[in-house]
Image (cartoon, grey):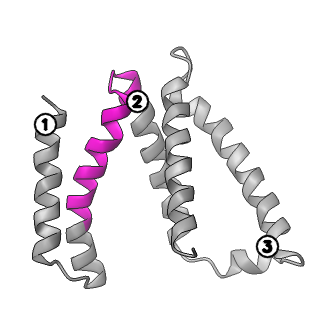
Amino acid sequence: MSMIWPIALVVLSNTIYHICAKSLPDGVDPLASLTVTYLVAALLSALLYFALNGSADLMREYRQLNWAPFALGVVIIGLEAGFIYAYKAGWGVNTAQVVSSALLAVVLLGVGRALYQEAVTWNKVVGAAICLIGLAFINR
């Protein structure tokens, strides 16, 4: 169960995420809406941190951080804004995620190999090729 619930949370959250991103009003600037999104996210993160950690010390946690959460904050804006702009440009909710995920799967094969020495097996190469073939079918 410890391996299942995180992926279930990702799938549920990602589904709701795309519904919300596709449902933003046309007249609202995506970056303006993201300010509200991240205010809510910051507040909820803080509340959950204290609720789940009892006598937690947030400042101690902050002192242990490296560059990654700062970079993550920057790239999340690109991710969020990219999807919102894609939906505004006419991408369907049933294709934008699939296309980006298929391309991402191919890119992450190389990233996993280059940065983390993960094995690139024939099964993974064939899987990536199937993803790319799927893109041809989706975009017909």
Alpha-carbon distance for marks 2 and 1?
23 Å
Which is the main secondary structure of the residues drawn in magenta? helix
Magenta span contains residue 100: yes
Q: Which residue is mark 3?
A: 58
Please tell me in which quadrant of the rendered image residue 53 appears. bottom right
Q: Is residue 25 left or right of residue 127?
A: right
Q: Which residues are magenta?
A: 86-108
- Mark 1 vs 3, N-terminal side: 3
Q: Is residue 59 left or right of residue 1?
A: right
Q: Residue at x 45, y 38 (%)?
A: 81
Q: Amino acid at mark 2?
A: Tyr
- Mark 3 vs 2, N-terminal side: 3
Please tell me in which quadrant of the rendered image residue 58 appears. bottom right
Element on which disc 2 rests = helix
Q: Is residue 72 left or right of residue 103?
A: right
Q: Which residue is mark 2?
A: 85
Q: Which residue is mark 1?
A: 137
Where, quadrant-wise, is the N terminus in this rendering? bottom right
